[in-house]
Image: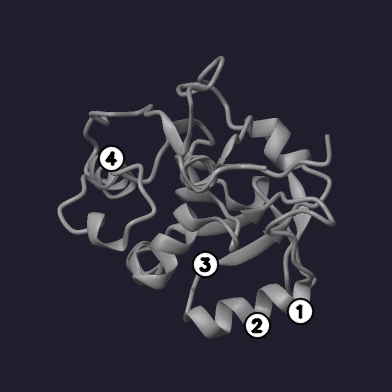
Amino acid sequence: MFSLSRSLTVASALLLPVLLPAQNPRVGAAAPQFTASDSLGRMQTLAENKGKYVVLEWHNNGCPYTRKHYVSGNMQELQKAWTGKGVVWFTVISSSPGTQGYVTAAEENDYLKKMHASPTAAILDPDGQIGHLYGAKTTPEMYIINPEGMLIYEGAIDNRPTPDVSDIKGAENYVNEALTDAMAGKQIAKSYTRSYGCSVKYRD
């Protein structure tokens, strides 16, 4: 039987973020092409958005590190601000059926409405095909693709790898910085950072 102290240690460990560097960061290379259905049943492709900046946000509504950015409204503010400037924002859900974060199209639409989220679309990736193409490892994990179809940012949303909402204030938001620099024609200061959060719940 576990002692109380050991049980608390195990519980605490479950909230520790997964901090994983990509094996082969592809920043500077062509972003992998994909075609997938979104939560409204529409087909979304990367190719049809050439000429625009595209953000890919890996999502799991059961992950405390993801919830932090939605409960606070931080992710929604980013979505609204950048889609308002012409950026295409895809929320990508790669959780497989039966795992944490898996949702049906109807469940995701209800969630988007409840959270007042406004991505361009929520892409359902239950087979993990898009996730594996990009090597997405955690939720949240962010990718930015430029109008030429090149990957220009990969990594964390910010520099505060905790599930605490209070840590958002004062955090360095890497996505804001990368998009601001890129749109101003400047070199992105930090084009790759180490992602944090819950592991993506792939089928394999």
- The residue carrying pointer 2 sits among few (fewer than 14), some (14 to 19) or many (20 or more) residues within 10 Å by Cα, namely few
Dots 4, 3 in contact, CB < 8 A? no
Question: Does residue 154 appear in the picture of this structure?
Answer: no
Label 3 or label 2, whichever comes before in sequence order: 2
Looking at the rendered structure, the secondary structure element under dot 3 is: loop
How much space separates mark 1 and mark 4, taking CA atoms? 33 Å
**Residue placed at 35% from the left, 42% from the top?**
161
> Which residue, given by chain and number where applicable, does mark 1 sit on?
106
Q: How many residues crowd around disc 3 within 10 Å: few (fewer than 14), some, or many (20 or more)?
A: many
Residue 194 shows up from this direction: yes
The disc label shown at residue 110, or none: 2
Q: Looking at this view, is 109 or 31 the one in front?
A: 109
Q: How far apart are marks 1 and 2 (CA)?
A: 6 Å
Residue 187 placement (x, y as % from top left): 24, 28
Where in the figure is residue 69, as x and y percent of width and height? 39, 61
If you read the primary sequence from the N terminus, does the residue marked by circle 2 or circle 4 appear first?
Answer: 2
The numbered mark, 1 or 3, whose residue comes first in the sequence reads 1
What whole-number distance in Å separates the C-alpha atoms at marks 4 and 3?
A: 22 Å
Q: For the residues labelled 1 and 2, say whether their Cβ atoms are less than 8 Å apart.
A: yes
> Disc 3 to disc 2, how far (Cα)?
14 Å
Q: Which of marks 3 and 2 is in front?
A: 2
User: Is the C-beta separation of discs 1 and 3 under 8 Å?
Assistant: no
The disc label shown at residue 159, or none: 4
Tell me the residue at 65%/82% (across/down).
110
The numbered mark, 1 or 4, whose residue comes first in the sequence reads: 1
